[in-house]
Image (cartoon, grey):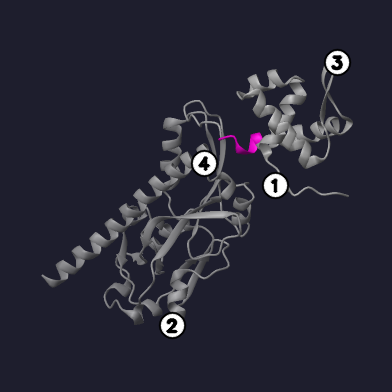
Amino acid sequence: MNEIDLSRLDLNLLVTFEVLMTEGNVTHAATRLGRTQSAISHALARLREQVGDPLLVKTARGMSPTPFAQKLVEEVRPILRTIQRIVTPPDPFHPATSKRHFRLAVPDFVPALLPKVIGAIHWTAPDVTVEWLAPNNQTLQSVAEGEIDLAIVNSAGPVPEGVHRQAAGGDQIAVTFMRKGHPAIANWGRAAWLEWPHIVVHLGERMKGHVESATDRHRLQRKVGASLSHFSQVSALLAQSDFLATMTPLVMGDGIARYELCALMPPIDIEPARFSLAWSFRLSTDPGNQWLRTIVKTQFDFLSAQAQAVVVGDHQRKRQKSKS
């Protein structure tokens, strides 16, 4: 079987050939393609040379295709339509009229994020629906396959091929929370931090959290008093126990004020937590997904900065008060 060197084959020759087969006339083909008749004839000559077949021959009735040309055009037409569909820019996304359904995978460590995002979406796109999913060990694979439009993930974790990440939320410092009046406050330090039991939250990710990594680095062993699957339970449990919880302020939301919790800086060095938006490469240029990413990142960045400012500012005020 003779094979053609595809690197020498100009796709435009096949486009010209397909139009010639449709029109059956060089003049009509030239008009449709906006080219001269000589350019069409030259393209046909080049294609004849490359495929080794006359393709179209002059007869009393005009241009008649050879059997090979008939077979070729039947194969070429769907290929050209597929290429055209692939390279055609995506349709514009109009939030006000869109009825798209988006799937988001976001852990509940930012209680205020859901209402903020849903509110922003509904304000500009009243007919768009959002499915809010809890992340699991298969989330990133679902993102890669396009089954989930957008996820918020730990920046330190690996991502499968086909997933793009964008940093969001900035550096999230860890803070130790406890109820007001907790016995550890009076003699706060490493010994107290290790003595009292901690609440930890596991989201199904197999990788270690930034607090656990810090204790390993310092060769310390903290007590785990409760292991939870949801962040939403942390504030209420702290208020009714002598547990400690070392995590980012984002987790607490308004729980700090509602449950009158105290926030102290951890007595060990803990690397900040970092998060990213993750989506499929296939959706990178999709206008709808770009719109969704902008909304989620804007709200996540705002809430992250707000949470950090409240806790850090409160810590600085306490330090100034203790010095005075």
Task: Name which residue type carries label 4.
Answer: Asn
Residue 321 relative to residue 258: left or right: left
Residue assigned mark 2: 220
Residue assigned mark 4: 289
Residue 143 relative to residue 253: left or right: right
Label 4 SS: helix
Kindly indicate the quadrant of the structure image that contains residue 171: bottom left
* Spatial CA span between label 3 and label 1: 34 Å
Kindly indicate the quadrant of the structure image that contains residue 214: bottom left
Q: Which of the labelled discs sits on residue 8, or is there none?
A: 1
Dot 2 or dot 4, earlier in sequence: 2
Name the mark nearer the viewer: 2 or 4: 4
Dot 1 or dot 2, earlier in sequence: 1
Q: Which residues are magenta?
A: 84-89
Name the mark nearer the viewer: 3 or 4: 3
* Spatial CA span between label 2 and label 4: 43 Å
